[in-house]
Amino acid sequence: DDVLTIQDILQDKYKSENQEKLNKNGCLIQCIFQKDGMMEDAEYKVGKMHNEFIKRTKIQPGDKRLESVDTCINESKDVTEKCEKAFLFVTCLFKSQRDHMHDLGYDESTE
C-alpha cells in the first residue's frame, strides 16, 4: 500500500501523502534507475536515460517526446537528494507524456 500508482501521480494524489511514503517511492525509482545505469547516486546519466526512453517507448530519435526527458532532467537537476530527485523526474515525465497524448487527441478514457 506504500507504492504510488501512475494514476496517483497524474492526479496529484501524492501531494497529500506523508514524506516517508514519498521517500520510499522515490528510493524505489532511484534504485531501478541506478540498476539500469540511468543514475549514479544523485547524478543522471543523460545518454543512458535517452537510450532507455527510446528503447522502452519505441519512439524514434528526434521524436518531440524525447524533449520531455531533457525538460524533466532540467527541472530536477539541482535536487541533491537522490530519492527526491528520481521521484520529481518521474512525476514530471508522466505528466509530460500525459499532456503529449492529450495534445494528440487522446484522453485518459481513450483505450
Image: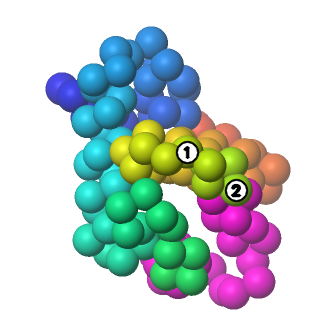
**Please, is residue 14 above or below residue 74 in the view?**
above
Q: Which residue is label 2 attached to?
A: 74
Instruction: State left or right for residue 32 relative to residue 92.
Output: left
Residue nearer the viewer, 20 or 97: 20
Is the residue under label 2 in contact with that under label 1 (CB below 8 Å)? no
Instruction: State left or right for residue 109 relative to residue 23.
Output: right
Instruction: State left or right for residue 66 relative to residue 84.
Output: right
2 drawn magenta: no
Give coordinates of residue 50: x percent, y percent.
Answer: 58, 78
Q: Earlier in the sequence, mark 1 or mark 2?
A: 2
In percent of the image, x 48 and y 64: which residue is there? 43
> From which residue to which does the magenta span run?
49-73
The Cα atoms of the two marked residues, 1 and 2, are separated by 10 Å
Residue nearer the viewer, 31 or 11: 31
Q: Which residue is label 1 attached to?
A: 79
Residue nearer the viewer, 63 or 28: 28
For residue 43, which numbered disc appears in the image?
Answer: none
Residue 65 in view of the camera:
no
Instruction: Say what secondary structure mark 1 lies in.
Output: loop
In percent of the image, x 31 and y 39: which residue is there? 25
Amino acid marked by disc 2: Asn
**Please, is residue 111 above or below residue 33 in the view?**
above
Amino acid marked by disc 1: Val
How busy is the neighbourhood of tag 2: few (under 14 within 10 Å), some, or many (20 plus)? few
Closer to viewer: mark 1 or mark 2: 1
